[in-house]
């Protein structure tokens, strides 16, 4: 029963051999998580907005498939769910959380920490939740709290009138694919890079261009997910291109990628004549951080115009921007058709992934 809500309850109600997990992702990319999950394992049941929170997907899967979830590229954290129960939003919610957590059976190590993410209005804070839930575990199991390096991370999230208890299985976010040798000031979350590559339907044999590649996140992600493609990055900043090469080396894909210093408003000067591109995936400059918002319309227009000659009928152009209306209207004026616009949250900003094709 895909897409249906998962009833609040405890894992005790699950059939033997079935696991109930919650994975976190970038709000707006939940369907990409389900697509990836279906490719990698048997999904028995899924809820794409678990407890009405975007960016959280719950999955019921065979216990023997749980380890495969660590290979997902569309998620950040994995939480093995233990129990979901109702809580009041006033102070009395805290004693319900104490009792609910006390009643859970936890597979605990010798030390633990409680982490809470709270969504909605409550008369208590996430620190209050961590305190009472931690106390319940100390009272029941006598384990020691270790905030820095605990053996077990217990997640006690509160979303509106639900308390979600589980064990966090990931220590660090799965968005960290490799140690970045170069940190670009606007580096993209690789989870978003992966989603954009999926939205553009990148396939083996494709030539993939990131025309604003910065530290190379999209190009490196492309090389990592698909070995038989030709990913190339262009950026106007020599420092970024040098950093992108270092990142590609750190990610082990240096021999699979190309980076070129160039101005993507004049791609004909950066790319070989007669060259065709199958997929263009770029995180465009927003002009917000640099405080140069006024240059954005001209830059987007010149980029889209100069790109045209490198595209064929089946090429796809997948762009991330905060300037949705601008990009859509420029696209329409410059001979592109908008196939899809989806809203995501990116670095605290409401942004759009916009998929275009030559009209
Ligand atoms: C949002 S950042 C890209 C960050 C990148 N996705 C990453 O993860 O590191 C935009 C990039 O566009 C580059 N840029 C700005 N104007 C450009 C132009 N005319 N041609 C090519 N690159 C440009 C900037 O140097 C910057 O690195």
Image (spheres, rainbow, N blue to C red):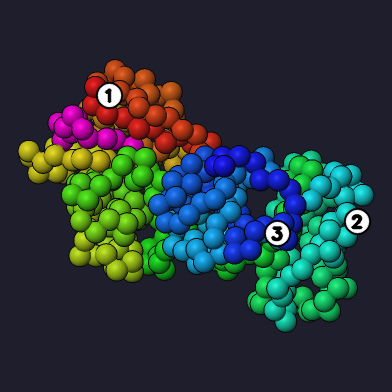
- Which sits in the foreground, 215 or 159? 159
Per the model, the C-alpha gap separating discs 3 and 1 is: 50 Å
Q: Residue furthest top?
A: 333
Residue 107 - label: none
**Do the CB atoms of the residues marked 3 and 2 lie less than 8 Å apart?**
no
**Image check: 251 left or right of 233?**
right
Q: Main secondary structure of the magenta part?
A: strand
Foreground mark, 1 or 2?
Answer: 2
Magenta range is: 307-318
Give how far across and how far down residue 332 sits, in percent.
31, 19
The first of marks 3 and 2 along the sequence is 3
- Which sits in the foreground, 89 or 220? 89
**10 Å crowding of disc 1: few (<14), some (14-19), many (20+):** many
308 is within the stretch colored magenta: yes
Per the model, the C-alpha gap separating discs 3 and 2 is: 22 Å
Is the residue indicated by label 2 positioned so its CB lies within 8 Å of ligand 1? no
Q: Which residue is mark 3?
A: 11
Is the residue indicated by label 1 positioned so its CB lies within 8 Å of ligand 1? no
The first of marks 3 and 1 along the sequence is 3
Q: Quadrant of residue 202?
A: top left
Q: Answer yes or no: is residue 170 visible.
A: yes
Residue 95 - label: 2
Label 1 element class: strand
204 is within the stretch colored magenta: no
Q: Answer yes or no: is residue 187 visible.
A: no
Give how far across and how far down residue 109 sits, in percent.
70, 79
Q: Quadrant of the C terminus?
A: top left
């Amino acid at each position: 029963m895909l897409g249906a809500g998962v009833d609040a309850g405890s894992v005790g109600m699950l059939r033997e051999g079935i696991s109930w997990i919650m994975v976190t992702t970038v709000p707006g990319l939940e369907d990409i998580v389900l697509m990836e999950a279906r490719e990698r394992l048997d999904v028995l049941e899924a809820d794409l907005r678990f407890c009405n929170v975007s960016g959280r997907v719950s999955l019921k899967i065979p216990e023997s498939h749980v380890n495969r979830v660590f290979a997902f590229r569309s998620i950040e954290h994995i939480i093995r769910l233990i129990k979901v129960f109702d809580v009041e939003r006033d102070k009395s919610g805290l004693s319900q959380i104490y009792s609910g957590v006390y009643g859970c059976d936890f597979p605990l190590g010798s030390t633990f920490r409680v982490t809470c993410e709270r969504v909605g209005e409550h008369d208590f804070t996430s620190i209050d939740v961590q305190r009472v839930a931690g106390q319940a575990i100390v009272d029941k199991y006598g384990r020691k709290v270790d905030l820095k390096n605990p053996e077990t991370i217990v997640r006690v999230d509160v979303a509106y009138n639900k308390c979600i208890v589980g064990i966090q299985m990931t220590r660090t976010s799965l968005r960290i694919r490799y140690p970045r040798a170069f940190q670009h000031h606007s580096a993209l979350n690789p989870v978003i890079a992966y989603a954009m590559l999926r939205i553009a339907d990148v396939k083996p044999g494709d030539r993939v261009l990131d025309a604003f590649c910065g530290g190379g996140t999209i190009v490196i992600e492309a090389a990592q997910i698909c070995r038989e493609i030709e990913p190339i990055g262009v950026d106007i900043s020599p420092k970024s291109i040098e950093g992108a090469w270092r990142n590609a080396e750190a990610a082990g894909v240096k021999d699979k990628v190309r980076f070129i210093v160039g101005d993507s408003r004049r791609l004909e000067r950066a790319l070989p004549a007669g060259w065709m591109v199958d997929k263009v995936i770029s995180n465009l400059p927003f002009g917000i951080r640099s405080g140069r918002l006024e240059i954005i319309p001209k830059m987007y227009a010149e980029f889209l115009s100069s790109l045209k000659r490198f595209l064929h009928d089946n090429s796809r152009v997948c762009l991330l921007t905060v300037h949705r209306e601008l990009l859509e209207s420029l696209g329409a004026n410059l001979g592109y058709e908008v196939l899809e616009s989806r809203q995501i949250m990116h670095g605290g900003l409401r942004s759009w992934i916009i998929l275009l094709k030559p009209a």
